[in-house]
Amino acid sequence: MSSPVTDRSRLLIEAARLYYEHNLNQAQIATKLDVSRPGVSRLLQEARDTGIVKIQIVDPGARGTRLESSLREKFGLKHAIVVPSDKQDTVLKSRMGSALITLLDQLLTENTTLGVSWGSTLQAATEHLKPRRVKNMTVVQLNGGVSKAELDTHATEIAGRMGENYQAIPYLLPLPAIVDTAELKKAIISDRNIAKTLKLAREADIAVFTVGAFGSKSVLVQADYFEEAEVQALIQAGAVADICSRLIKADGSICSPELDDRTIGIELAELKARPFSIAVAGGLNKAQAIRAGLAGGYFISLITDEDVARQLLDEE
């Protein structure tokens, strides 16, 4: 018979190591330590109670859930959905797109008007659509697009595919996002059919859009809407993001009223007034832009990734 261990802490540690690290059962530990089996149970319980043993349950979804709760609380959001980050842009966009379709399936009801913008993230979302008929539903494009085919923004295609999926009538805006003059814009939007589409956009029950980081690599710049000197001037004026092709500063205010007057689509004040405004954007390069959108109060629902969520919450 082995000598009894007199140091209580050492006995607790030894019992815990045998049970948790060496996978011995309580009967084997009882024999090895020369204590009763109920005594082993009490030792293990005391080891947990005194902090010698700390049990951590790792739930892969818990991190995202905590971040979602913190985002909702800090920014007053109705929905916050956080997906795992990924270095591959296509993987991240697919994850966010899938999350968007899941949320839409919860929100879409009879007589809903769904407004959608465009971009590669929303295009990725359409790959996750599940055929479903929503009675008397309407889908409307929120803003004009870009004409450069190589940019692959799918401006009218996204609204069209969503309309087809939900057996809804799609209203499209096969127009540029920005035109040369405010007078030209007025002439374009005075057309009866375009005016009807824009009215539907302004009255959408749900608005879905992305948030872009403004700079030399942004879609609007790549689409040749701006010369390089204009880009630099807008950056100097404080432009950090675009939402539905409208540029905003870090505080969420419109960067250039003159440019805004030449932009075709839903205005940001109208976007803010929608019952459900959903922004889908991820990647650390979008963090500042998303923060600007939050500052402007342009969306009440956000779908993003863990890295961005932590940065928005000022976490490491």
Image (cartoon, grey):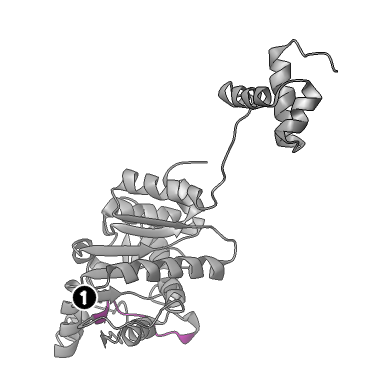
Please tell me how many numbered marks the rendered image carries.
1
Q: Position of residue 65 (x, y in %)?
A: 44, 50
Is residue 227 highlighted in magenta?
Answer: no
**119 or 15, which is in the foreground?**
15
Q: Label 1: few (<14), some or many (≥20) within 10 Å? A: some
What residue lies at 64% left-to-right and 24% top-to-bottom? 52
- Determine which residue is flagged by label 1: 112
Magenta range: 138-149
Q: Is residue 24 visible?
A: yes
**Residue 5 falls in image quadrant:** top right
**Residue 221 falls in image quadrant:** bottom left
Q: Position of residue 156 (x, y in %)?
A: 35, 85
Q: Amino acid at mark 1?
A: Thr
Q: Is residue 69 left or right of residue 139?
A: right
Q: Position of residue 304 (x, y in %)?
A: 43, 58
Reply above or below: 210 against 311. below
**12 or 280, which is in the foreground?**
12
**177 or 226, which is in the foreground?**
177
Element type where label 1 sits in the image = loop
Q: Position of residue 141 (x, y in %)?
A: 28, 79
Q: Is residue 244 visible?
A: no
What residue lies at 29% left-to-right and 83% top-to-bottom? 133
Q: Is residue 244 left or right of residue 288?
A: left
Quadrant of image for the N terminus: top right
**Residue 202 falls in image quadrant:** bottom left
**218 or 19, which is in the foreground?**
19
Is residue 147 highlighted in magenta?
Answer: yes
Q: Residue furthest top?
A: 6
Reply above or below: 234 against 27. below
